[in-house]
Image (spheres, helix red, strand yellow):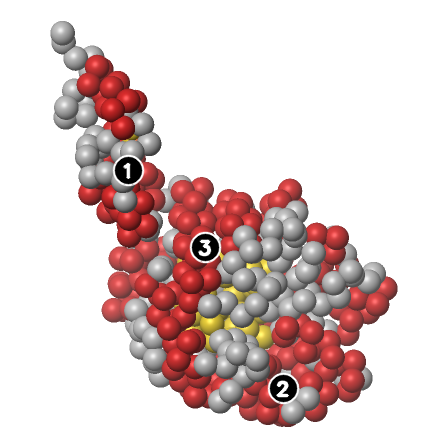
Amino acid sequence: MVNIRDYLPDTSLLNETARAESIENDRLLRLIKAGRIVIPQNPRRPHPPCAIGEGCRVKVNVNVGTSRDLCYPELEKEKAEAAIKNGAHALMDLSTGGDLPAIRKTVLSTPVPVGTVPVYEAVRRAGSVQDVDADLLFNVIRDHCRDGVDFLTLHCGVNQDVLRSLKEDPRRMGVVSRGGAFHVAMMAAREEENPLWKEFDYLCEILSENQVVVSLGDGMRPGCHEDASKEAKTVEYLNLGRLARRAFQLGIPRMIEGPGHIPLEQIGYNVRMIKEITNHAPLYLLGPLVTDIASGYDHVVSAIGGAIACKHGANFLCMVSPSEHLALPRVNDIIEGTRASVLAAHIGDLLAGREDARKREIMMGKARQELDWERQFGLSLFPDIARSIHDRDTEQETCSMCGDLCAVKMVRDLFISPDGDRQAKEK
Ligand code: SF4
């Protein structure tokens, strides 16, 4: 039997994490022990800590990776660097084309936690989904752990009960999670149970040997709003609840992955239900996408859904890029998608009542009232954009929107003293 102690951060990592999150050491340790915070940190690859879960800042993951049709490892490196530069806290390498171990090594050379989905490589190694067996899958998982991957998305909750639900309560889009679809196809072709479900304890042994965090994948995330209330998703949630409990008993840190396309009004109860049945494990969401018809702007759609989800307890947002549903993202798509997710995460921090996030808002209000552009740029989530838009028209005290009719300046000069105190000026 493994023990959660194997994963507990040493004193210096604990101190560093507590400082970064503005959280007391004792509380941080208590929440880690309770399975409500994870710190993905493969000992083979030291990097600054990234705590995910209750009481921590909302974190952002960005997916990079090749496909068979577009396989340029240098482009993936550029995307990974652009994501980090724009605020990503973690990366996932979802490559399916080219030399997968070599590309993974490139992504692992970055200074952030890295996740992977081993079943992708298992399918490539086998040559077809039908030929992936349990041994191959576990071997690939072991290889990713030994390479230094910090967290693995594993679709352990896609079992025969889920398959039955898909048949009895069919969905318009079937299965849109690539990993989920692989497992469904493997199970159907081989007429076998998912080895990750059936041999979950064995999987946990591999993870514990390598101190790797499991992210219990949402293979049944709905692919359109019409599918949001179908049975398969709920059956998988219940499975994830059982697996989260078992992982906790075995001392394995785990995150839970959550829904894709769901209407805005359904976000609250979905998030709260997952949190409840997984004993408040850290929740990692793709989206939620609150409309199906904004192709090209799905990063905005996802940021809206992500912010609402944070209100109800989501902890980790997966970037959705403008090219979602359309093509493999390019560098600019990664930049735009990352920025939208960072924005949603900040709103999540505000909704969670984080004092540091609130203070920054107050400081921005003050800088705007004082027409202090340098401080406004510095406080902006994206200073370079703010500066370039402002400076393109004028470098005067006001901006070009109202020019000499600047409302802020007019009223400030009338009622507010130069030091910013809200006192009527003496005439
Ligand atoms: S010019 Fe108009 S938009 Fe610009 S700071 Fe003044 S009030 Fe705001």
Query: Looking at the image, can residue 264 be seen?
Result: yes
Image location (x, y in percent) of residue 150:
43, 76
Q: Residue furthest top?
A: 427
**Image quarter of the C terminus:** top left
Q: Residue furthest right?
A: 168
Q: Residue at x 25, y 44 (%)?
A: 391
Q: Is mark 2 within 8 Å of ligand 1?
A: no
- Tell which circle, 1 or 2, labels the residue nearer the N-terminal end: 2
Q: Would you say 274 lies left or right of 85 here?
A: right
| Residue that carries the numbered disc 1 in the rendered image | 364
- Tell which circle, 1 or 3, labels the residue nearer the N-terminal end: 3
Q: Are marks 2 and 3 in contact (CB under 8 Å)?
A: no
Q: CA distance from mark 2 to mark 3?
A: 30 Å
Image location (x, y in percent) of residue 370:
21, 30
Residue 396 is drawn in which quadrant? Answer: top left
Q: Are marks 1 and 3 in contact (CB under 8 Å)?
A: no
Q: Would you say 156 lies left or right of 376 here?
A: right
What is the crowding at mark 3: few (fewer than 14 residues within 10 Å), some, or many (at least 20)?
many
| Residue that carries the numbered disc 2 in the rendered image | 123
Q: Is residue 40 above or below residue 58?
A: below
| Depth order, front residue of 126/73 | 73
Helix, strand or loop at disc 2?
helix
Residue 341 - label: 3
Q: CA distance from mark 1 to mark 2?
A: 50 Å
Q: Would you say 216 lies left or right of 330 here?
A: right
Q: Is residue 369 above or below residue 351?
A: above
Q: Residue at x 72, y 87 (%)?
A: 130
